[in-house]
Image (spheres, rainbow, N blue to C red):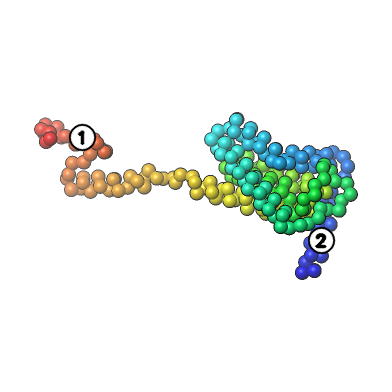
């Protein structure tokens, strides 16, 4: 166990050194990416655009994305209450400082959850939201708010939340091909009647077929 902890610590320190942005445009981009999704504001705005400008699938993506984000955010909050980990020791942290546990990254969890659920509901949207989630994850390390392992844990939590919403949506979706299944017994009955030389009806409530020149038998 001490060896594992030491290895994780070394990987985290290496990740912080590699991922931390120098001052300049990239640091500004990282700060904007982190702030834009705080509290789910960025994802709510994305869903609003989808709901207003898109069709039925876009509206489904908007709802599923926000549902997955809420589930991931709740899961991250609960995990933070159970796992207490200090924030990175970076002296200069971009954006406002937070005192909550560093494990896991709730920003990353929400971003990945939204990307998975919304991207599944609307496949053409998937590349954009997945790229946005990757930028958010990078920004949490780049700004010094999280260790790389916090981001990995957040991504795993987010993927689980997104997959959960996808599975629920698939179970709630109406079964396809129901018409052919329900028509089976009726169709078989018509074929049997025709084979026996009996008159058949076109459907429920339809009048019996009358052959030419024959008097109707009422």
- Can residue 122 be seen from the camera position used here? no
Quarter of the picture containing the C terminus is top left
Q: Quadrant of the N terminus?
A: bottom right
Q: Are marks 1 and 2 in contact (CB under 8 Å)?
A: no
Nearest the eye: 167 or 198: 167
- Residue 157 has which mark? none
Residue for point 67% across, 42% down: 129
User: Residue 164 in the image: x percent, y percent?
Assistant: 58, 51
Q: Quadrant of residue 23?
A: top right
Q: Secondary structure at mark 1?
A: loop
Give how far across and how far down residue 171 sits, in percent.
50, 49
The residue sitting at 80% across, 41% down in the picture is 31
Which label's residue is closer to the chain start, 1 or 2?
Answer: 2
Q: Exactly how many numbered labels are in the figure?
A: 2
Q: Position of residue 125 (x, y in %)?
A: 63, 39
Q: Is residue 180 visible?
A: yes
Task: Classify residue 217 as left or right of residue 89.
Answer: left
Residue lying at the far front in this picture: please name it. 81
Q: Secondary structure at mark 2?
A: helix
What is the spatial separation of the Cα atoms under label 1 and label 2, in whole angstroms?
82 Å
The residue at the point 71 percent across, 41 percent down is 39
Residue at position x 78%, y 45% in the image: 139
Q: Which residue is mark 1?
A: 207
Asked whether 41 or 49 is in front, the reply is: 41
**Residue 205: quarter of image:** top left
Q: Residues within 10 Å of mark 2 (few under 14, many from 20)?
A: some
Question: Nearest the camera: 89 or 126?
Answer: 89
Image spot of residue 78 (x, y percent): 68, 53
List the residue tagged with mark 2. Answer: 9
Q: Residues within 10 Å of mark 1 (few under 14, many from 20)?
A: few
């Amino acid at each position: 166990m001490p060896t594992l902890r030491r290895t994780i610590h070394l990987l985290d320190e290496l990740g912080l050194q590699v991922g931390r942005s120098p001052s300049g445009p990239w640091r500004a981009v990282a700060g904007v990416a982190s702030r834009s999704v705080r509290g789910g504001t960025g994802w709510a705005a994305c869903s609003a655009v989808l709901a207003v400008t898109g069709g039925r699938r876009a509206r489904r993506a908007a709802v599923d994305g926000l549902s997955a984000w809420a589930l991931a955010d709740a899961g991250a909050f609960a995990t933070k209450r159970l796992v207490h980990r200090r924030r990175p020791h970076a002296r200069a942290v971009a954006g406002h400082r937070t005192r909550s546990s560093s494990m896991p990254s709730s920003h990353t969890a929400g971003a990945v959850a939204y990307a998975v659920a919304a991207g599944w509901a609307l496949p053409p949207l998937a590349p954009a939201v997945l790229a946005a989630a990757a930028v958010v994850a990078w920004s949490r390390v780049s700004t010094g708010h999280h260790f790389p392992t916090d981001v990995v844990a957040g991504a795993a939590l987010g993927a689980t939340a997104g997959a959960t919403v996808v599975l629920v949506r698939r179970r709630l979706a109406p079964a396809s091909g129901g018409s052919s299944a329900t028509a089976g017994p009726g169709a078989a009955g018509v074929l049997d009647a025709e084979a026996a030389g009996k008159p058949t009806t076109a459907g429920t409530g339809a009048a019996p077929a009358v052959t030419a020149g024959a008097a109707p038998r009422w």
